[in-house]
Amino acid sequence: MLKIAHLYPELLGTYGDGGNALVLASRARRRGVTVDVVEVTLEDQIPDADIYLLGGGEDGPQRQATYALAKDRALARRVDDGAVVLGVCAGFQILGTSYDVEGDITVEGLGLLDAVTTRGPKRRVGDLLTRVGSRWIVGFENHGGQTELGAGVSPLGVVEEGFGNGVLTGDAGRHVDGARVGRLYATYAHGPVLAQNPWLADELLGLALGRDLEPLVSVADQLHRERVEAVGDFHGAAFAN
Ligand code: GLN
């Protein structure tokens, strides 16, 4: 049994990131895995789960979610136990050390990632395309915060289109997106990101299940290939999938 906890959808659900839970469940079930998806509300205690999902949200609900997560402590404990976590946008910022919201209030994050979010010079809205090794993440971003990663934290990928974390990083001064530390993944990409990038859903499932998954033939995989090819045509470059 694979248990997926979708955390506070009533607070972190403005951008359709709840679709990430549906995608994980569907792709696991199609491999014969029994799945339980739990929607955890503010009223609930956070259950023990194999995968935790945190979506994007507005500043106010984001703060409420942060306080509730800090009080419950189950997420931090489960991360120590090896659970897989995906944080998107507000979810990413919450996992970090601290973030500033409108009005310049600094909120302490969960500290599961060494990442500090401050207000950016402008809201970053638009398409986001990130290279992760030989793979691509396509999605869109909409955030006022920008995130600086600590020295020991790797970004999830290098941005080709858009802003991602929004601060230039490394000697080459590139934009990067998200973070990856062990089994903790974070990104600014909505979409929902796992619907648009099924390979990433399979990577998370593979980690949680402790095995490589057999490939799936699905419309989502085909659409991902087509989107990446379309970007390649647009850029006149050979974009591998
Ligand atoms: N409120 C945060 C910001 O604007 C997160 C936004 C989001 O989750 N899309 O930076």
Image (cartoon, rainbow, N blue to C red):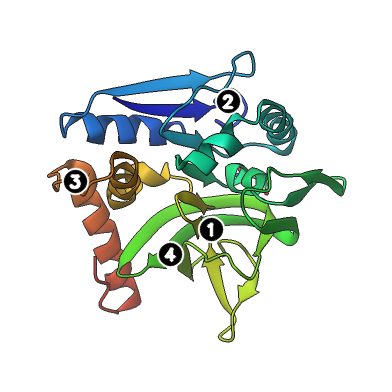
Q: CA distance from mark 4 to mark 2?
A: 27 Å
Identify the element where label 3 is drawn: loop
Compared to 128, does 93 lie above or below? above
Q: CA distance from mark 1 to mark 4?
A: 10 Å
Is the Cβ of the residue at disc 1 closer than 8 Å to that at disc 4? yes
Q: Quadrant of the N terminus?
A: top left
Q: Which mark is residue 178?
A: 1
Q: Which mark is residue 130?
A: 4
Query: Could you tell me the amino acid type at mark 1?
Result: Gly
Q: Which mark is residue 213?
A: 3
- Locate residue 45, reporting x and y percent: 59, 18
Q: CA distance from mark 3 to mark 1?
A: 24 Å
Q: Residues within 10 Å of mark 3 (few under 14, many from 20)?
A: some
Can residue 17 be seen here? The reply is no
Query: Could you tell me the amino acid type at mark 2?
Result: Tyr
Q: Earlier in the sequence, mark 3 or mark 4?
A: 4
Q: Earlier in the sequence, mark 2 or mark 1?
A: 2
Q: Which residue is mark 2?
A: 8
Q: Is residue 142 left or right of residue 38?
A: right
* Residue mark closest to the camera, 4 vs 2: 2
Identify the element where label 1 is drawn: loop
Circle count: 4
Name the one closer to the observer, 51 or 215.
Answer: 51
Q: Residues within 10 Å of mark 4 (few under 14, many from 20)?
A: many
Name the one closer to the observer, 14 or 87.
Answer: 87
Q: Residues within 10 Å of mark 2 (few under 14, many from 20)?
A: many
Identify the element where label 4 is drawn: strand
Query: Could you tell me the amino acid type at mark 3?
Result: Leu
